[in-house]
Image (spheres, helix red, strand yellow):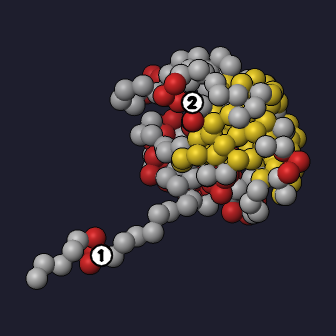
């Protein structure tokens, strides 16, 4: 795919980058781990089919289609407002790329590019119970439907903090960047078949 073939172009900002060589949130949530400072880097190198160089999921076959995670900073800001919490660090969610100005959840199931790196948006990056400790009580539930997107890298490149260009095959609405996508609720009568 040529990135110039994507019809929609958005000026966004990369506000957070993470390449972590080890799992930080492993096992039951723990206050000592939660109190450690969040790692952050100024740049990450992405390799097609492998992921983020130096990251714990780099080259792991089980994570090949989900080796780069992308999150909207606005999702964490909206969560903070809903919970009445102070400013929350979006990198505490352990996503590789945090963007400002992009409706990230709309990129599920489409190939898009970020500063020329082609990413195949896949399944949602579901939040884990650790978020109640590292962000704020209620964050685990509050991030559902807006925890970001797991992506498969289709090309190589480098991402840096600061302005970036996102190209997409679908229209995005930056005003919706903090909103959760919730699955439709099935009525109780539709959940179980009636017996005769």
Quarter of the picture containing the C terminus is: bottom left
Tell me if 138 is positioned left or right of 99 in this view.
left
Task: Answer whether labels 2 and 1 touch (C-beta < 8 Å).
Answer: no
Between 6 and 94, the residue placed more toward the observer is: 6
**Does residue 194 lie above or below 55 as drawn?**
below
Disc 1 designates what residue?
Answer: 190
Disc 2 designates what residue?
Answer: 64
Q: Residues within 10 Å of mark 2 (few under 14, many from 20)?
A: some
Q: CA distance from mark 2 to mark 1?
A: 36 Å
Mark 2 and mark 1 lie on one chain; the one further toward the N terminus is 2
Tell me if 57 is positioned left or right of 189 in this view.
right
Which residue, as the protein is rendered here, is positioned at the far bottom? 196
Give how far across and how far down residue 27 sits, in percent.
37, 26
Which residue, as the protein is rendered here, is positioned at the far front? 1
Quarter of the picture containing the N terminus is: top right
Can residue 37 be seen at all in this image of the molecule?
A: no
The residue positioned 84% from the left and 38% from the top of the image is: 115
**Does residue 174 lie above or below 5 as drawn?**
below
Give how far across and how far down residue 123 sits, in percent.
54, 47
Can residue 169 be seen at all in this image of the molecule?
A: yes
The residue positioned 81% from the left and 47% from the top of the image is: 166
């Amino acid at each position: 795919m040529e990135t110039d073939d994507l019809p929609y172009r958005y000026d966004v900002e990369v506000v957070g980058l993470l390449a972590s060589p080890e799992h930080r949130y492993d096992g039951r949530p723990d206050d000592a781990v939660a109190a450690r400072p969040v790692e952050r880097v100024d740049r990450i190198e992405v390799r097609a089919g492998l992921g983020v160089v130096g990251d714990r999921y780099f080259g792991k076959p089980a994570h090949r289609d989900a080796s780069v995670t992308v999150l909207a900073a606005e999702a964490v800001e909206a969560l903070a407002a809903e919970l009445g919490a102070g400013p929350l660090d979006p990198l505490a969610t352990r996503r590789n790329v945090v963007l400002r100005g992009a409706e990230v959840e709309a990129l599920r199931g489409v190939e898009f590019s970020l500063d020329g790196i082609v990413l195949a948006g896949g399944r949602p990056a579901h939040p884990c119970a650790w978020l109640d400790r590292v962000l704020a009580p209620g964050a685990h539930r509050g991030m559902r439907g807006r925890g970001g997107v797991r992506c498969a890298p289709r090309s190589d490149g480098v991402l840096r903090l600061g302005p970036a260009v996102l190209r997409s095959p679908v229209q995005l609405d930056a005003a919706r960047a903090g909103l959760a996508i919730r699955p439709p609720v099935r009525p109780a009568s539709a959940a179980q078949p009636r017996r005769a």
